[in-house]
Structure formats: C-alpha cells, structure tokens
Image: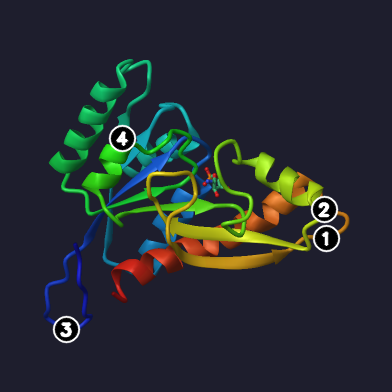
Amino acid sequence: MCIFAFKPNQTVKRTRLAVFCSGAGSNFKVLFQKAKEKKLPFEFIVCVSNNSQCGAMQFAREQGIHTIHLSSKTHPDPKEFNRALISKLSELQIDLILLAGYMKKITPELVKEFPKRILNIHPSLLPKFGGEGLYGLKVHEAVISAGEKESGATVHFVDNDYDTGEIILQEKVNVELTDTPESLAERVLKVEHRIYIQALEKVTLHQ
Ligand code: GRF
C-alpha cells in the first residue's frame, strides 16, 4: 500500500482512496478538506455511490473527482454488481476504501479483495449500538432509549459483518438529559469529522 517518510527529496507514494457514500457526504467533504489543509499524501480518486444525486456525489463532481454510480437498478444481479465494482476499483488502482455513510452492505468478495483496507465510521461507541438496522438517527434513538450516559463515534476496519471489524479509533460524547436523537447526532457528527482523518492517518502514515 503506502509507506511514508517525510524526508526531503524522497518520493512519497500517495494513497489512492475510494470513498463510498449514499448521503450528504459531510465526512467525505471534511476528509477531503483536511487532507488538503494538512498536505497529506492522499489522493481522492473516486466517489462510489448507489445514489447518483446525493450530496457526496455532487461534491465529487464539483471537485473533479471521478464518480461511479452502481446500484441494484444499474446492476440488478448482485454478482454482476460485485464484479463491476471490483473491476473498477482495480482499474483505478485503489489502495484503501473509506465508507462514509454508505448504505449498502459490503460483500465478502470485496472484503477479500481489500483485507484490512476498508474503513467505516459509525456514530456510536462500538460494539454498542452497531449491527444491522442501526444506522443514522436510529442509532441515537436507541442510545437515548437505553438511558446511556455516553455515546460517541468509532472508526473501524470492515469485516464480513455489520460494524464488527477491529476498532481503529473512537471518541466519547456525553449524552445530556435534554438530548434528542437529532441533537446527539449533531454532536457525534462533529466528533466523526475529527476522528476519521486521524484514523486514516493512523492506518497509513504511522504503520
Ligand atoms: C455518519 O453519521 C456516519 O457515521 C454514518 O453515516 C453518516 C454519514 O453522514 N455511517 P455524512 O453523509 O458523512 O454526512
């Protein structure tokens, strides 16, 4: 993949990133901006989405980043979907995949192709409040209903199950008595924006 040492006159191999999104893409935008500000050796090669009109895809187009729209409409056969996705990613020589609000399950074939090279961000303190059906506001509703005193965000490697892969980084957020799912989501999202880039640096630059 990518080993870096910031010594003058030394060639640095830039990590070629694919970001998978289905929604607003705020994590993608922040990752892109922070990588630019900090002059990190990352190259945002492609945004993959099942929703061609989502905020993340619009942002990618504005930035001149390649986009790939793949969905059950474009590829009704899941095997074909997988084949198309894997062949595109290998054509683009992707080193690392970042899931940022991607609403489709990652297949075992993709995990096998990218072992420990797919990262996800989840808006809870995993292993708590993860798993199938726990996404978006549902996570924060569950946290509040359970009377939790703290929640947070987690960046982890993706394995063959939902939200179960090895944890790379997590940060806590206090749950206030007055919190609604929306207010908690807002504070957790701020943390997500801080830790995703840190986790990315951790797995690439500091290996
Ligand atoms: C984030 O809360 C992330 O943890 C979850 O999906 C949401 C995506 O938000 N996996 P955005 O599209 O990055 O704004």
Q: Earlier in the sequence, mark 2 or mark 3?
A: 3
Q: Circle 2 — which element?
A: loop
Q: CA distance from mark 4 to mark 3?
A: 34 Å
Find disc 3 in the rendering and name its residue.
8
**Foreground label between 2 and 4:** 2
The answer to whether residue 15 of the structure is visible from this angle is yes
The outermost residue toward the bottom is 7
Q: CA distance from mark 2 to mark 1?
A: 5 Å
Position of 60 with respect to 84 (left or right) is: right
Query: Which quadrant would residue 13 be assigned to in this image?
Result: bottom left
Find disc 1 in the rendering and name its residue.
176
Find disc 2 in the rendering and name its residue.
179
Q: Earlier in the sequence, mark 1 or mark 4?
A: 4
Q: CA distance from mark 2 to mark 3?
A: 49 Å
Q: CA distance from mark 1 to mark 4?
A: 39 Å
Q: Earlier in the sequence, mark 1 or mark 3?
A: 3
Label 3 lies in ligand 1 vicinity (Cβ under 8 Å): no
Q: CA distance from mark 1 to mark 3?
A: 48 Å
Q: Circle 3 — which element?
A: loop
**Foreground label between 2 and 3:** 2
Q: Residue 119's mark?
A: none
Q: Amino acid at mark 2?
A: Asp
